[in-house]
Every structure is written in C-alpha cells, then in structure tokens.
Image (spheres, rainbow, N blue to C red):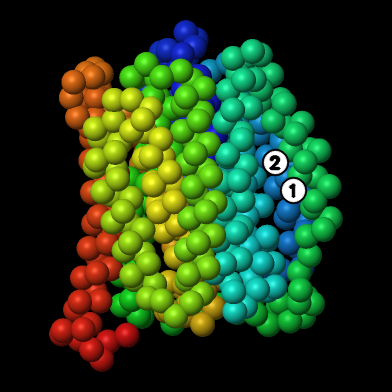
Amino acid sequence: MSFGVFQDYYASLPEFEADAAHIATIGTVAQALCYLGAPLSALLTKRFPKYRRHQIWLSWLMCILGLLAASFVSSVPGLIATQGFLYGLGVLTLMFPIIGMVNEWWVSRKGMAFGLISAASGATGAVMPFIITALLERYGYQITLRACAVAMVFLTGPLIPLLKSRLPASDQAQLARMDWSFLKKPLFWVYGTAILTQGMGFFFPVNFLPTYATSIGISKTGGALLLSLTSIAQVMGQFAFGYLSDKNISIGLLAGVCCTTAGLASFTLWGFSKSLAWLIPYSLVYGFFAFGFGTMRVGMGREVHGDPLATYAIFIFLQGVGNILTGPISAAITLSPVSLRDYGLRKYVGMVLLTGSSSVLATAFIGGWHLYRVFLGPRLR
C-alpha cells in the first residue's frame, strides 16, 4: 500500500534516472507474485496442511531478507530482484497458510472475516505512507528499508506463535481433496472475466496517485496523504462489503455497485483533478468501492462452489494478470509531457481512461449475465 511513496522517491534520484521507466516494475513484481502465484501457493498449503506454521516462519524471513537486501543495492534491476521479487515471494508464501486458518475458524460470517483480513493492509497503509515519507526525506531509501525490516521483526515476529489451525491435521488432510466441478459452471467464468477486467486498471491509482500529485505541484506529504486516505477508505469498504456479502443480498449487485462507482469516480474526480481538493474525495471513493470489490471473491466463490477457498486463489490470480501489466502499460501510456490544462494532465489520460473503463466493463459482464438469465436463460446456474 505504500509503494507509491517509494516509487515517487526513486523517480527523483539521479542514479535511477536511466531506468526511470522501469521503477514501477518493482512494485508490480511484488504485487504480481502475490496474485499470479496464488493458485500454486494455495494448492501447496491445502495439500500439506501440517506444514502451515513452517511456511509462515519461512515466508517471514524471506520478507525481512528482501527488505534488507534491497537496502544494499543501488540500481533499479537490483530493487526489482529484492524489494520486488524476494519480498513479494515472501508475502505470497505467508498469505495462504493464514487464509487457510481463517477459512477453518469462520463459517457463517466468512465474508466479513475475509474482509477484515483484507482490510488489515489498509489499516497499516493509513499511517505507513507518512512514516515512510518522513524516513525517506530524512535518511534516504537504504536506511528506510532497513527500518522497515527491523519493524517487521519486532511487530510481526511475536504474533506468529499465536497463529494456529482449528482442525487437527487428520481432518485437514481430508479437506485437502480439491473439487474442480465449479469450472463447468458459466457463473464462475462470468465472475472470473469481471475480476480479470477490473484488474486491468485497478492498480494504477494506488501506484501513481503520489506521482500524479507531484505533477500538479503537491508536496510528497500530500501524496502520502492520498495513499493514507485510500487505505482508510479501503478498511471501511472491505469491512462493509465483506459484511454485506454474508447477507441475503445479490453478490452481482454488490459487485456492480463497487465497480460502477469506482469507474465513474476515475473518469470524473481523477480525470479532472488539478488540485488536492479533487484528489482527496477520489482517494476516499476509490478506496472504498474499488477495494470493496475485492471482498466479493468470497461471496462469488460461495455462489459457484460450496467451499469459497477453492475459487479464491483463482480469482486472485485473475486480478493479478492485470497487475503484472501495470508496469509495461504505464511506461507505454505516460510518454506525453504534463499539461495542466488537459484532461488527466495529458500524461496520465490513458491511465485514467483505462482505470475507469475496466471497472465499468466489469459491471457490464456481471450485469449482462444476470440480464441474460432473467430474460433468456432462467434455467442456467
């Protein structure tokens, strides 16, 4: 959630100027690993449940080593390999043992539980951009990365012994068998297509709002504020939509509200932004609704399969396909110079349009399917 601050800082360093177009790839690699590696990580976690604790300890060390190693490199490719690949691989390995534990402990309110777990990163992101901005401005990126590694040791390490499964290893082994029947259901592919489409533009605001703010003369603290507000809205949105997904409310309706609102906000509040007064409400609206859509994965999985965890990793993977394209797409569509008179400052117009249209198109896929069922195919599931 705070990489946008790092990205804006790296772009201002003369030693990274030659590779400035590839700086976004650092965050893209880290995030993409968490998404694209989800099916494999989930499968291994489900297949070997008794090794969950070992997985968590190993991944914790990988995250710390990724940050420490990044603090000793002085090139963009080096940062891609450490802060990008190694740290991202650690987060990926950490995620699914914990998700598997949550899946065992929560049943009727599973959507709310997964919403809270997802919102945890938003709660951290509400304060971390300010802390990281202050550290970067005063000490530089090397000391900042080491401070983050030390903080992970003392803030995360003591919590790991408290993580445990609810079911004994024998029951977990019985649940390890995977039922792939959901692949035959059209609704799975409708939801998957919507998630893939929304993911094509989802990550641009999180990664580029600080850079956009700098382009219109807003300070780095102002850019950190935007990420913080996005994170606060993310917490509220993911909890709210996670809670609603457990109720007798159409998942398609909730998903459509999330995507449509986030898309329209991108077209208007972001596209016409020339000051912080426009970017602040955009950060709040986008954070609430765009991230709220992510919690629909549990409800969507529940509609197409008895165990939502079976589809959860696949839905995460599909969103990650869009994430991995963020770096090269952003490099290709931000070649124009900044023009304060133009929509999207001219430089970011492609980014704004892609973010908005991908969300609206995701709504069209879900809405089109439900309309088809009502008018032409009422017997389809």
Residue 178 seen in render: yes
Q: Give the residue at the far front of this rendering.
A: 277
Against 21, is 196 above or below? below
x, y percentage for residue 142? 65, 18
Element marked by disc 1: helix
Q: Residue at x 73, y 53 (%)?
A: 56
Residue 248 position, x and y percent, is 44, 80
The residue carrying mark 2 is: 62
Reply above or below: 257 against 10. below
Q: Nearer the viewer, residue 211 or 67?
A: 211
Name which residue type carries label 1: Leu
> Mark 2: which secondary structure?
helix
* Residue positioned 51% across, 57% down in the render: 238
* Extreme-top residue of the structure: 14
What percent of the width, then of the height, locates residue 173?
A: 70, 78
Q: Are marks 1 and 2 in contact (CB under 8 Å)?
A: yes
Quadrant of res 289? bottom left
> In this orientation, which residue lies closer to the viewer: 339 or 378?
339
The quadrant holding residue 206 is top left
**Front-lying residue, 55 or 198:** 198
- In the rendered structure, the answer to whether residue 381 lies left or right of residue 336 reads right
- Callout 2, which amino acid? Met
Name the residue tied to disc 1: 58
Q: Answer above or below: position of 175 versus 213.
A: below
Classify residue 258 as left or right of residue 234.
left
Instruction: Give the Cα distance between marks 1 and 2.
Output: 6 Å
Residue in the picture at 59% in, 74% down = 109
